[in-house]
Image: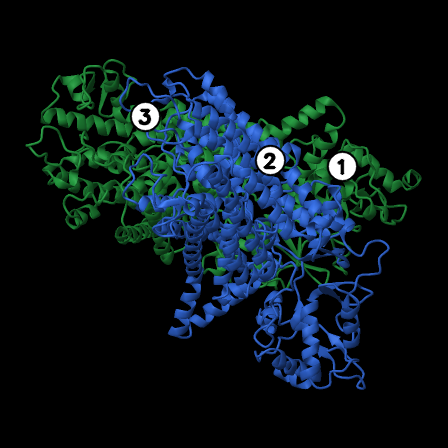
Chain colours: A blue, B green
Amino acid sequence: MYNVILKEGGVCVCVQSLLVLNSLPVCSPLPGVSSATPTEEMNGAGNLMDFLDEPFPDVGTYEDFHTIDWLREKSRDTDRHRKITSKSKESFWELIKSLLDAWSGWVVMLLIGLLSGTLAGVIDLAVDWMTDLKEGVCLSAFWYSHEQCCWTSNETTFDDRDKCPQWQKWAELMTGHAEGAGAYVLNYFLYVLWALLFSFLAVSLVRVFAPYACGSGIPEIKTILSGFIIRGYLGKWTLLIKTVTLVLAVSSGLSLGKEGPLVHVACCCGNLFCSLFSKYSKNEGKRREVLSAAAAAGVSVAFGAPIGGVLFSLEEVSYYFPLKTLWRSFFAALVAAFTLRSINPFGNSRLVLFYVEYHTPWYMAELVPFILLGVFGGLWGTLFIRANIAWCRRRKTTQLGKYPVLEVIAVTGITAVLAFPNPYTRRSTSELISELFNDCGALESSQLCDYINNPNMSRPVDDIPDRPAGPGVYNALWQLALALVFKIVITIFTFGMKIPSGLFIPSMMAYHHHDWIIFKNWCRPGADCVTPGLYAMVGAAACLGGVTRMTVSLVVIMFELTGGLEYIVPLMAAAVTSKWVADAFGKEGIYESHIQLNGYPYLDVRDEFTHRTLATDVMRPRRNDPPLAVLTQDTTTVEDVEALIKDTDYNGFPVVVSRESERLIGFVQRRDLTLAIKTARQKQDGVVSSSVVYFTEDAPQLPASNPQPLKLRRILNLSPFTVTDHTPMETVVDIFRKLGLRQCLVTRSGRLLGIITKKDVLRHMAQMMNQDPESIMFN
Amino acid sequence: MYNVILKEGGVCVCVQSLLVLNSLPVCSPLPGVSSATPTEEMNGAGNLMDFLDEPFPDVGTYEDFHTIDWLREKSRDTDRHRKITSKSKESFWELIKSLLDAWSGWVVMLLIGLLSGTLAGVIDLAVDWMTDLKEGVCLSAFWYSHEQCCWTSNETTFDDRDKCPQWQKWAELMTGHAEGAGAYVLNYFLYVLWALLFSFLAVSLVRVFAPYACGSGIPEIKTILSGFIIRGYLGKWTLLIKTVTLVLAVSSGLSLGKEGPLVHVACCCGNLFCSLFSKYSKNEGKRREVLSAAAAAGVSVAFGAPIGGVLFSLEEVSYYFPLKTLWRSFFAALVAAFTLRSINPFGNSRLVLFYVEYHTPWYMAELVPFILLGVFGGLWGTLFIRANIAWCRRRKTTQLGKYPVLEVIAVTGITAVLAFPNPYTRRSTSELISELFNDCGALESSQLCDYINNPNMSRPVDDIPDRPAGPGVYNALWQLALALVFKIVITIFTFGMKIPSGLFIPSMMAYHHHDWIIFKNWCRPGADCVTPGLYAMVGAAACLGGVTRMTVSLVVIMFELTGGLEYIVPLMAAAVTSKWVADAFGKEGIYESHIQLNGYPYLDVRDEFTHRTLATDVMRPRRNDPPLAVLTQDTTTVEDVEALIKDTDYNGFPVVVSRESERLIGFVQRRDLTLAIKTARQKQDGVVSSSVVYFTEDAPQLPASNPQPLKLRRILNLSPFTVTDHTPMETVVDIFRKLGLRQCLVTRSGRLLGIITKKDVLRHMAQMMNQDPESIMFN
């Protein structure tokens, strides 16, 4: 064998070029031997990695706004794993290193859980403080929120825990008058001013430092997880700025929640910790497994719902979710929730955000209103999505989009001006939800629980239904109704602004209380038959379901949120109804709609492709296009290749035996080709423009006068994915989805006909759904 | 176009043969037109279905013990869906039909939920009654169990609810003496006798009527869900017999749980309802979606844990689990749990089996014992699996396997004889667990709660830790320890016997009480620092985790089982530790081990294939084998085809352009080929043994003397799956897993080299793991 190598000049060059391109001094086996003894060289995807190792820092990565090839990433990881395993047998130190590598996944999960839990705790505390800062300040310690301020005060009794001398509203502090029209106006003015200040700060920070920190982030994260590269979207700056601006945005009183952004923050944490381990930082596929788990941790801390978080990641966000990720996600979600609990921002040392105390059973007849709530939720979801998308499209296409700061300021101003007079909109949304979900206890000071006490009894009775509603209840009802309308309208305009915005809580906040009045009458006196808090919960689930189209994860989040294991059935009834109703008007949830609006190349797992087209209808070149740009295995020159690279912008080129036979032998990436030729020209003697490039094992038979040929077999992917031209597109779509391909070659009877890329598939799908195929952007 | 048809005799035959084979009078478009205008004929996978429609009842199905082709099934379903959608525009009735079709999935789920919930309720009631029947009988109504008997009696107070005059032990009833050695011996004797009777009945029923009703069923269901056909395994008879024998087996006191078999029962229900809708009955892929959901319903009723059931199905059982199935599974699981709750077999109107009342917080320091429990669980899991597999292998290979009835009788006898003297093994396992999980309340009559009451106090105090343990506690402890050893040993021999047997509860039952004594001392008096029930829970989770290797679903089941949302962290710690420890000794859980033992062709999603082999190393024909059996597109005769079918037992044959060029054009199924030739010989004139079979659009140019050729393009799959010979096996395994292929063709530069079937892949994997490749059976 070595004889052969020494004899044939071409093969010797091969050895030499290998030594240059790759530190591994292994000569590729000769044909015939190759198929029997698989070596490194033979491994189609693996050899890319060898070639792309250390020497050049940016190889093996993808360009910005490009799609990754999952199969290749997976192959590279297996290769890496294999190397470590074989090395681990060599020495004790390598064994330790291999064990560390095996455990690095769990370490990353632990770190993600700790950091995202901590950040969520800090955000919660900061939001609490700053929301209250709009109304007043704590005299004993200005960094206390209203609640903390009065808690630490010993002078108050339990009954009026909201009123304590240490906490002073601004008017009281500045003028000394706590009551009166002047004080009210001053408070009002300062409330609006603070809100404007916060939101101005937020939007400016986002614009100046991290443009990617705006929005909810979930549509982009879905796209990234499906295999798209957006550099910097999960970077350190984004993490920092998003955390700060999230606090500012929520505190400014805008109708947005911190849940979506928390997912983004957690994913940034995930990305940050990925960079500590080359296993994850150098493999886009593995990185996405970590990010899926991080998303679970994000939802986990947003609601204190670890299981719900995992299911959310599985159902809503993730694209590739192997079982391993399931376990790790659960671990990360638990650690995060546990860290948050240790920080204890809600002061009740519970894992859950809105713990409900009631365990009243519900009756079968109540399923009817629950389902009606579901219908309402579905309709509201449809309406919300349509209105929001219409508004965002207008923002994108008209002058409006050019003044994002002004827009944010204006919306904040309007929100603050309208929100202050109504006590239900003035306070933070999560406080409000907490009050709505809670049942009226005997000691509840809330206006909603203002039932008239029987004067004959010395202490308030526990069974509310027997008592007539006091004026407070009716007052509360119309205030709530107003709050409902206000929140519906303002949320439409808020979601999608250039400011961190989530939508969970705003949608959950929505709107349940109609039912109250109806059921007040229906309910027989004395029987505690209706739990208003339960209706609030179910209504919230229905609205959230209509907007996001979650089902299982939604129900699990809701019941983890409230601790009400008994209410799965009502929640499920509402969530499923809501989804059905909303789906009848359009399959896409809010996140998918935003993905579509932005033209991200996202291949939804849920879309069923049912059209009768074939691969031949989708592949390029089309009928009248110039022929496919291919390389031949041993007749193309360096010059030709460089011309091809210059003239086209394809990501790669098929290599065929000859232009006549069109028999496919492999596929070569544009990036690898450019790099290899550049390196060869620099380091390998005798490579000139007229040198022949060959991809075969042996150098072609050339006249002696020809310059030295250049062997590039190492960068050739010998196992490109092919389908026949008769393959139905539904199968092709399935293959692209399940294997995460970037491109696929089309053959007929062994001849290369064309190529289908992910973008072609997406465009075709858009076309089939009567959408504009040009709306799909990026590569 | 019609002109051409009329001119060329061959094409006319094509029209004719189409009319015979298929009721659709569409002639295939001519070449050239074909690639531009996709029609039915072009759809490689689709046309199989047209061909295989009504006329022959058994086409489109697979043979017993064969693997299905998921891609083909999916393709067929899309085709069906497409037909219905296009028809639905024709008339109102068709629209209704299409809506019904769209809803049939939910209807099936509803039916599965209702039936499996009902069956579970009936089984629970029957087991309760029959377990008690071994000890005595209710005088007021013989169909009452002990508990029901004494509940309905008004004469008893709450304190001795277990003792009421209506309930008489056998000795008391027969001899009039309730106490004394004679009565004890008589009770003992009758207890054993009943047990033997029950188990004899169970094993006889299984042997005579439904051999598939034996065992836990989960390994087989996993295999079926991965795409394997075992006819009758989920049939009506199996359902009936399994339900009856499950009651008998559990009542006989054998150390087995009803949880695994309940999954089997639920899957039988699923299969039963599938047959109502052609959408599911005629498509093996769709059927498996339903079965996945049914498995979720099964676990849901086994534990009253709907979310846990869904996760169990996702994590442990299912192979293909699209999001649609997630929602439907959840729905089925909920309906099932709800139905069970309505039947209320546990008499506490709770969804959960073992509701725990305690909400004592746990301390961080307790994580250490929890993790130790996890280690113990992992070790126990490993031990159990090894011992059980060794025993089952012995049963398979030696004389033992020939006397299953005798074996069951013997094990039952031993179990009953040993179980009776110990009160913890005498009663049913679920009763025992219920007691162990519960905290000692003040009114608890259990021996475990026999703490000495302070005589100075008039009523028992609630805070147990202050009181010294009474003799009952120590008594209970050694009885429990004995029970532990006994259960460990006997379960090893029981699981895998020819009788319905599950293993959840027996494993959960395992073994938590060591810790008690340790912690009794550790605990400072007065502080209620340790909750024994929690340790029982965590111990159970650890053992179950070690045996089955579940994690997330296990934790969720445990916390749904007990309603203890607070204890996720301890449970998770134990479950993950247990899995790690057990995985260190061997990757396979009990179900995978049994799959391997039985040689089922199961391609585990969790096994990572990390070897460096290539497709070329696995494909057949091997180096010295005869060449691959192929058909040529237009030179093979009917005779040749029949000879090929007779001489080989391959499931299908590749079709190539010619033997020289070896360029692949498609793949034809053996079954379709046999059927088509048979039909053509019967119905088409002029087809004789020397007729040429052709797969091209046009008939080949033949001398006039030749008999009429036979066109078979319709049964040709024009989009067979191919990989190149250089494709790494890890990629091939991935493709087989994700796309659910049955076979895959191997090419090099467009030439056909060989074929890889699922069995080849499995054999290769076994070989790489140093196992016997011949252990993989079936096709």
Q: Amino acid at mark 1?
A: Arg
Query: Are the residues flagged by discs 3 and 1 in contact, CB closer than 8 Å?
Result: no
* The disc label shown at residue B628, or none: none
Residue A523 place in picture, x, y as percent: 43, 17
Residue A89 place in picture, x, y as percent: 42, 71
Query: Which residue is label 2 attached to?
Result: A381
Q: Amino acid at mark 3?
A: Asn
Q: Chain of mark 2?
A: A
Query: Which residue is label 1 attached to?
Result: B681
Point out the tag, 3 or 1, that comes first from the N-terminus.
3
Q: Residues within 10 Å of mark 2 (few under 14, many from 20)?
A: many
Q: Secondary structure at mark 2?
A: helix
Q: Are marks 2 and 1 on the same chain?
A: no
Q: Amino acid at mark 2?
A: Gly
Residue B677 lies, with reference to residue A237, above or below; the image says: above
Q: Quadrant of the C terminus of chain A?
A: bottom right
* The disc label shown at residue B348, or none: 3
Name the residue nearer the viewer: B521 or B491: B521
Residue B745 lies, with reference to residue A418, above or below; the image says: below
Q: CA distance from mark 3 to mark 2?
A: 39 Å
Q: Residues within 10 Å of mark 3 (few under 14, many from 20)?
A: few
Q: CA distance from mark 3 to mark 1?
A: 68 Å
Residue B655 visible within the image: no
Q: Secondary structure at mark 3?
A: loop
Residue A278 place in picture, x, y as percent: 50, 67
Indicate the quadrant where residue A543 lies. Answer: top right
Q: Quadrant of the N terminus of chain A?
A: bottom right
